[in-house]
Image: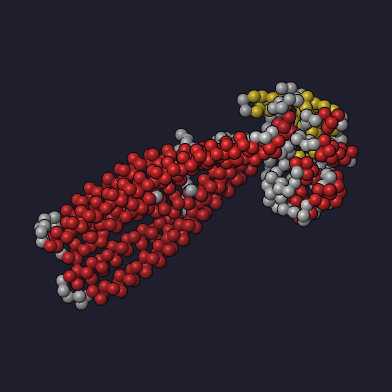
Amino acid sequence: MASSAAPARLPRHPAERIGGLLSLVSALLWLGQAAFIAWALADLLEGSGARALWAVPGVFGIALLRAGLKYAADARLAVAADAVVSGLRARIVSGEAATTAPSVAGGPGAVAALACEKLDTLRPYLMRYRRARLRTSVLPLLILAIAFWHSWAVGVVLLMGGPLIPVFMALIGWAAQEASEKQMVEVGALNDLLVDRLAALPDMHLIGAGDRIVDSFAEASDSLRTRTMAVLRVAFLSSTVLELFSALGVAMVAVWVGFSLLGVIEWGAWGATLTPFAGIYLLLLAPEYFQPLRDLSAAWHDRAAGEAVLDELALWREEERPALMTSGTAPVRPATPLSIRLAGLVLRRDAREIAYPDLDIAAGDRIAITGPSGAGKTSLLRALAGLERAERGAIEVDGAPLDGTTADDWRARIGWMPQAPHFLNRSLRYNIGFGAPLGDDVLEAAGVAPVLETLPRGDLTPLGERGAGLSGGEARRVTLARALQAAPDLLLADEPTADLDDGTAAAVIDGLMRFAEAGGTLVVASHDPRLIARMDRRVEVPS
């Protein structure tokens, strides 16, 4: 996502510094290895060959040392990348868990994409780009100094060819950055689209909109494919440019060295004849002069993708969202009689303010919150649960304002039944009790017992995140059992009978009434006249 905010600074892990230094030392050792090779080959050219054997141990010894250092550098950089990405991912998860307000980064799908697949693009940025940048800042300058020491002609060739590469990298990098930002936006948009369509899948199936959903996914995925190919085109272009300039530079050095050793050219070596050792050494160093620049170019699109993610991460970190009301301590469930009072409550929903009528709720009350769709019924339930902060007015529970000091204890007394059931990819038993033992009375009160008879493994049947294996009505009953599991004093139910057939809706209503008849306080947001008729009071939320 493009952003005018400054990119987020990635924390420097100690292992990254160690890995970068090990990689640099491994590259510098090539200077010594090349010297041994040049020494051996020059000795052979001069007809002796006696000293060539002495160079063999040095060549292979340095090669083994370089391989060991490279392996150690890769291992340390991998550790650093894992630590940084895991830390950022944990920060996003904890940040999203600490607020109930939507993120400017996008919907749940976009935030999930940022925390998962987008953060993974930082791994090559940490493991390849920063290492290549360090090597580029040291190795070419050192080789350039060695080249000028032996031959000003070779030094001029390298000096002319080297700076052209960063210039073209910068030009191509601007295009890569823009293409990567657009691709990241498309990834988040596609994830948001997937989340929205999955949530509305039953409704879409009922109205026969399956073909339209498939077409919308095809358009979104084709757009993402176009963005991805644009990034790849830029990456291939940068590689082609680098290969061209490095090949020309090495070829020019090889031509000059060859003609100098043959005696055809007698200039370019500070007035002295070029020795076979110096000529071979320069030939071996010329490709290594361009190699760090080539590595940096290969990692340039990693930088573009990484900085696009850092821009989005900076945008996410800088946005101010209201924190979830919590004290951060373990909740203590009070034994006082339940009492709720709404006085002048006003909630903000986007740019609109919603004013609610004053309301007193006592233990055992059964209240229906009604009103047109979008009026703010769900927002009121969320405010009663301490998940929304009041713009004005107050909510009092047991005589005390509902705020960060009281919200945790208050939520320990609440059962929550959302309109859209959500499950973990665990067993049905775990999705109800989250590890706590289940009581038969809870399963019976929620009407889940008949559901278990239809499942292949009963309450041990694994459920998908969308409740695979359960019908819509069965999923609602499982959600009701989850809400009743902790024996709450207050049950908040949001459209508990929406989209259910008459028989299933009647079963869910009976489960709610059993809770109320046992002395529980029930507050439901609903359009269902059958459920509303069985409530004691009806509170209308104006549109």
Q: Is 82 situated above or below 217?
A: below
Q: Is 88 situated above or below 389?
A: below
Q: Position of residue 470 (x, y in %)?
A: 75, 46
Say whether residue 323 is visible: no
Q: Position of residue 344 (x, y in %)?
A: 74, 24
In the image, farthest residue toward the right: 517
Q: Quadrant of residue 522?
A: top right
Quarter of the image where the C terminus is located: top right
125 on left or right of 250: right
Number of marks in picture: 0
Judging depth in this view, the residue of 173 and 278 nearest the camera is 173
Q: Quadrant of residue 201?
A: top right
Judging depth in this view, the residue of 68 and 413 nearest the camera is 68
Which residue does the image show at 13% across and 60% down from the upper left? 260
Which residue does the image show at 69% across and 27% down from the upper left? 374
Q: Is 496 situated above or below 19?
A: above
17 on left or right of 215: left
Which residue does the image show at 36% across and 62% down from the upper left? 26
In the image, farthest residue toward the bottom: 50
Q: Position of residue 219 (x, y in %)?
A: 53, 37
Judging depth in this view, the residue of 372 and 54 nearest the camera is 372
Q: Quadrant of residue 516?
A: top right
Which residue does the image show at 69% across and 49% down from the upper left? 464
Q: Position of residue 171 (x, y in %)?
A: 34, 40
Say whether residue 438 is visible: yes
43 on left or right of 169: left
